């Protein structure tokens, strides 16, 4: 009896649990007025067909392309020979200047007034020399006249004169000759003194002019101002560049663009195809005249190209596209760069083998940016795939 009751209790519990589950399931069913939403089916992925390329023979030109700028073959950096405070520039970058033109000045204080004073003193000293020379000529003329007079008296007095008178007249002639000689020597020494004073005044003038000249920046040749560095009132050290000047009649192209991989390919003397941005229809041929590392190059520009294009009106700073052919190969196996795959230092291609695609290691040579030479690993007409 007890066993039956226990069984009945367990059966009742199970029945209650079953009814509760059924109620919950019924609550999840569609209620009146609800809209039944059909789930969106997920499409089966369709594999994207891989681009197929063929290994074929052709020509490849390995070249380096750079962006260059027209510059001058003759360029100088200008500086003052002395230090001082910058008074200002008389020109701006891009201005055309003539040889000897004053481009900039330092503050020289009262030096111009001192120069004017020294020049006046030099003028006075030179006048003294001229005056002394005039006095000498006048004095010598008077002394020569006196000498001639004494000689005339001696000649006329010889007849009928006593020996004593003749001797006295002879002494007078000798005295006149001595006076003429001493007078010339005295005036020569006086003129020499005045000339020495004038020379000293001249040295003072030259020193002042040189000091003022050192405070002026002059154009060494006809050219174009490339840059200015500084402003009025700024202190400038001696021989510190404050301005650049370039001659516009001798042009070249400079570039700082080669990559670490491209730079070793470049050699002096290689031909360069030049296309100026201002003249896109005119192709010019030039030649490499400098190839160096940026650290060793002038102003960090390691590539220099010379060219001749007198028919083009080029300005300093004009841009040009450069193409330098470093190697040319003809009738060689080539593969499109899009079909070249890499993993670290490994280069390989995807080749179809039956129903499968396999990876084949390849050895490559020169490239033109679109196709690359195949040295080993593939054969002509073999098909390769992009990944």
Image (spheres, grey):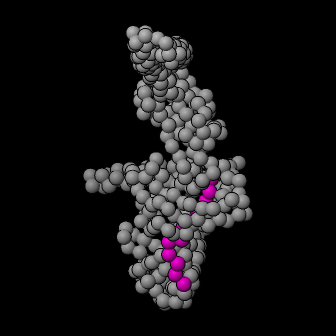
Judge left or right: residue 1 versus residue 133: left
Q: Which of 20/271 is in front?
A: 271
Relative to residue 359, is residue 200 depicted above or below? Answer: above
Relative to residue 39, is residue 224 depicted above or below? Answer: above
Residue 347 visible in this rendered orientation of the protein: yes
Q: Which of 356/329 is in front?
A: 329
Judge left or right: residue 92 versus residue 82: right
Q: Residue at x 54, y 60 (%)?
A: 305
Work out which residue is located at the far left of the displayed protein and give it: 2
| Residue 128 locus on image (x, y percent) | 51, 14
| Residue 318 locus on image (x, y percent) | 64, 51
Q: Residue at x 43, y 13 (%)?
A: 166
| Residue 216 locus on image (x, y percent) | 52, 28
Q: Which of 15/301 is in front?
A: 301
Q: Residue at x 41, y 56 (%)?
A: 293
Magenta stretch containing residue 134, yes or no? no
Residue 112 visible in this rendered orientation of the protein: no
| Residue 139 locus on image (x, y percent) | 51, 13
Q: Residue at x 50, y 24 (%)?
A: 209
Judge left or right: residue 216 versus residue 172: right
Give the residues drawn in magenta, as a range: 319-330
Q: Quadrant of residue 264?
A: bottom left
Q: Which of 92/159 is in front?
A: 159
């Amino acid at each position: 009896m007890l066993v039956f009751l226990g069984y009945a209790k367990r059966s009742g519990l199970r029945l209650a649990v079953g009814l509760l589950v059924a109620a919950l399931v019924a609550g999840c069913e569609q209620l009146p007025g609800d809209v039944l939403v059909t789930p969106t089916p997920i499409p089966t992925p369709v594999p994207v067909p891989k681009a197929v390329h063929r290994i074929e023979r052709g020509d490849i030109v390995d070249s380096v392309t750079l962006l260059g700028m027209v510059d001058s073959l003759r360029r100088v950096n200008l500086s003052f020979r002395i230090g001082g405070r910058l008074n200002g520039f008389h020109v701006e970058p891009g201005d055309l200047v003539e040889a000897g033109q004053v481009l900039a000045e330092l503050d020289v204080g009262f030096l111009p007034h001192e120069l004017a004073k020294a020049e006046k003193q030099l003028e006075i000293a030179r006048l003294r020399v001229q005056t002394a020379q005039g006095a000498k000529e006048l004095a010598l003329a008077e002394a020569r006249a006196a000498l001639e007079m004494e000689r005339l008296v001696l000649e006329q007095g010889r007849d009928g004169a006593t020996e004593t008178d003749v001797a006295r007249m002879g002494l007078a002639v000798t005295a006149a000759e001595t006076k003429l000689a001493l007078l010339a020597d005295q005036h020569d020494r006086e003129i020499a003194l005045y000339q020495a004073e004038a020379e000293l005044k001249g040295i003072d003038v030259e020193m002042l002019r040189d000091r003022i000249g050192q405070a002026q920046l002059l154009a060494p040749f006809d050219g174009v101002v490339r840059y200015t560095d500084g402003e009025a009132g700024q202190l400038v050290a001696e021989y510190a560049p404050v301005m650049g000047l370039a001659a516009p009649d001798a042009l070249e192209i400079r570039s700082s663009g080669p990559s670490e991989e491209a730079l070793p390919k470049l050699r002096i003397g290689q031909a360069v195809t030049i296309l100026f941005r201002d003249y896109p229809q005119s192709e010019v041929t030039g030649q490499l005249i400098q190839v160096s590392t940026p650290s060793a190059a002038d102003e960090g520009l390691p590539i220099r190209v010379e060219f001749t294009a007198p028919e083009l009106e080029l300005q300093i700073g004009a841009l040009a596209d450069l193409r330098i052919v470093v190697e040319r190969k003809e009738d060689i196996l080539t593969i499109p760069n899009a079909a070249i795959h890499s993993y670290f230092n490994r280069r390989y291609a995807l080749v179809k083998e039956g129903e499968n695609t396999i990876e084949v290691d390849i050895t490559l040579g020169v490239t033109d940016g679109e196709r690359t030479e195949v040295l080993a690993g593939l054969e002509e007409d073999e098909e390769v795939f992009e990944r």
